[in-house]
Amino acid sequence: MLIKMTTNIDPYIEIRPYNDDEIPAAIDRLIQDDEFIAAILQHRFANHAPWFKALMTPLVKVYLKYKWSKLNTTESIQLEVKKYLQQTLASTTQGVTFSGLENLDKQTAYLFVSNHRDIAMDPALVNFGLHQNEHKTVRIAIGDNLLKKPCATELMRLNKSFIVKRSAKAPREMMKALGTLSGYIKHSLETGNSIWIAQKEGRAKDGNDFTDPAILKMFHVEGRRQKVDFPTYIQSLKIVPVAISYENDPCDVAKARELFEKAVHGQYEKGEFEDIESIIQGIVGDKGRVHVAFGNVIEEAFETPDALAAEIDRQIHANYKLFPINLLAAGDDSVDAQVKSKLESKLAELPQGAHQYLIDSYANPVRNR
């Protein structure tokens, strides 16, 4: 007699965040990861001799094992992250404000499509606003280009991030990755988990927040598999545009320099740790005032990805909070002298040819409005 064996293989296991039962093992892998420990020691004891760091390595591992022993659920990890985030926002911003959350239902899962200025802070701020207002936090889409180190992958998957496989190049591999991603987004929403995803790949280094229709086509891959047309399927996703505005972008000078280099030399060669440095600078750098505006749920039946992209852009541009530096960069000379001197000191860090790129990054939200 043949016994039929059925195994439930998780189709999303390669990209999804860790489940609670997987957390202790992932934390253990992190603590045993020498590169991860070395990065902590380098950050904490930058000016100490190599022998001192070598001496500290086993102590740091013991300390982390003790400190993280109680972190065995996603919620416990997020509450730990929240403590650090509150400290960071207290020391690097002049206040964070939120709008539009009162229009969202706490029991509904949404697909938040947001402008993208900062690698780590954008989704962290969205989560912070949701948590403060008693909404469930989101699952965060993160490109595998940022996950070159195993410890980075562990950290992200521990904190409700799922992986967007951008490195897939062969057509068949790309289609499979898109199908899995699209299915996972729909599966998350259907199981009551909201999603955060940037409106296009990479940060808007020039301050131009525009949605890439390719991302909206990716949403519909699962719809096509289910034989549901684009307008109907998109309505089922409950898309909410989000506009995140920083009065001061801690990475603005670096972004302007990169755009200038690309324009002059036709390319820009990123350093090995440049993405990590951008993440750290974005977290620890001065952000001034910050505003996160949640838009309205898109309920209309848009026939094409381009038409849907235009509506997402309309809401983001309308909800983007303009600060005095934005108005100054766009030509309004009536702002106070302090703002002018701030902009001048930024420009002084750049070669003359790169000035316009920095000015545009602050002016473009005004022009788009």
Image: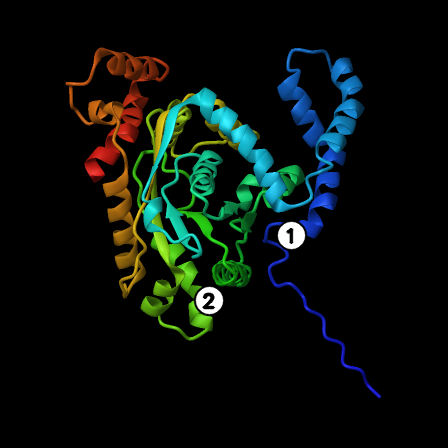
* Residue nearer the viewer, 33 or 123: 123
Q: Residues within 10 Å of mark 2 (few under 14, many from 20)?
A: many
Most distant residue in the right direction: 1
Q: Quadrant location of the C terminus?
A: top left
User: Mark 1 falls on what kind of element?
Assistant: loop
Q: Nearer the viewer, mark 2 or mark 1?
A: 1
Residue depicted at x 75% and y 26%: 63
- Earlier in the chain: of badge 2 and badge 1, it is 1
Asked if 315 appears above or below 87 in the picture, the reply is below
Left or right of 199? Residue 24 is: right
| Rendering coords of residue 162 (x, y %) | 55, 50
Residue depicted at x 35% and y 67%: 230
| Rendering coords of residue 246 (x, y %) | 35, 30
Answer with the quarter of the image where residue 227 lies: bottom left
Task: Return the residue at label 2.
Answer: 222
Left or right of 27? Residue 190 is: left
In the rendering, which numbered label is found on residue 116? none
* Residue nearer the viewer, 310 or 298: 298
Task: Return the residue at label 1.
Answer: 19
Answer with the quarter of the image where residue 5 lies: bottom right
Residue depicted at x 47% and y 59%: 189
The image's colouring method is rainbow
Q: Quadrant location of the N terminus?
A: bottom right
Q: CA distance from mark 2 to mark 1?
A: 23 Å
* Residue nearer the viewer, 210 or 115: 115
| Rendering coords of residue 249 (x, y %) | 38, 26
| Rendering coords of residue 361 (x, y %) | 30, 30
